[in-house]
Image: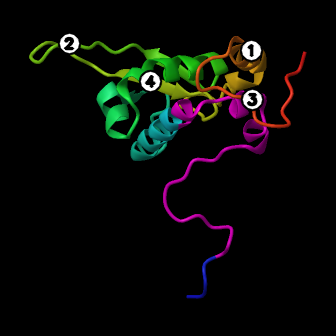
């Protein structure tokens, strides 16, 4: 056996399209939002890339990943508003001994078992720009990026 092809990726991976990475929606995401996406992409990989739309993740999971608990809900809301994330089923918290279930998520830029990506982030540039204009904490416009009017 020779050397592996340089274009061959070993192991699980998540592809990010260039147009998404260059979008204003992506550029406007806070670090917390990006970390939440990282955690959900890891969850997606743990499910073999076949459970998008049914990705379970609890606040405890996000916290164990290094995200401050009080930052999780605003980060998720930011991702939903920017069009990168959909909450497909709201979880139910509770005390020990009561019925609890995690929220389920869908990454809009990846396919589900039954449908192609919806790429909701494409239509959310105005929402991302509005978040920046409102001065959402932790959201800053990168240098050189202008908002389309």
Q: CA distance from mark 1 to mark 2?
A: 36 Å
Relative height, residue 92 to residue 104 (above, below): above
User: Going from the N terminus, do you reach mark 4 or mark 3 first?
Assistant: 4
Residue with the mark numbered 3: 141
- Which stretch is magenta? 5-34
> Viewer-proximal residue, 73 or 87?
73
Disc number placed over residue 133 in the picture, else none: 1
Q: Which residue is mark 2?
A: 94
Q: Determine which quarter of the picture holds residue 144.
A: top right
> How far apart in space, not on screen, are marks 2 and 3 (Cα)?
38 Å
Dot 2 or dot 4: first in sequence order is 4
- The reply to whether discs 1 and 3 touch (Cβ–Cβ < 8 Å) is no
Give the numbered dot on residue 71: 4
In the image, residue 128 above or below residue 48: above
Q: Residue 142: percent from the left, percent from the top?
A: 76, 35
Distance from label 2 to label 4 (Cα)?
20 Å
Position of residue 2 relative to residue 100, above or below, is below
In this orientation, which residue lies closer to the viewer: 29 or 79? 29
Q: Mark 2 near mark 4, Cβ–Cβ under 8 Å?
A: no
């Amino acid at each position: 056996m020779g050397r592996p092809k340089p274009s061959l990726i070993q192991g699980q991976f998540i592809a990010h399209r260039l147009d998404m990475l260059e979008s204003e929606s992506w550029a406007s995401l806070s670090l917390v939002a990006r970390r939440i996406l990282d955690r959900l992409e890891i969850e997606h990989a743990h499910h073999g890339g076949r459970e998008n739309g049914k990705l379970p993740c609890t606040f405890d999971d996000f916290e164990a990943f290094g995200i401050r608990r009080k930052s999780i809900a605003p980060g998720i809301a930011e991702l939903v508003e920017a069009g990168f994330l959909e909450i497909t089923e709201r979880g139910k918290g509770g005390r020990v001994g009561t019925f609890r279930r995690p929220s389920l998520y869908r990454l809009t830029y990846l396919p589900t078992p039954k449908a192609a990506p919806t790429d909701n982030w494409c239509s959310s540039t105005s929402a991302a720009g509005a978040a920046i204009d409102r001065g959402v904490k932790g959201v800053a416009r990168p240098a050189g990026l202008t908002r389309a009017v």
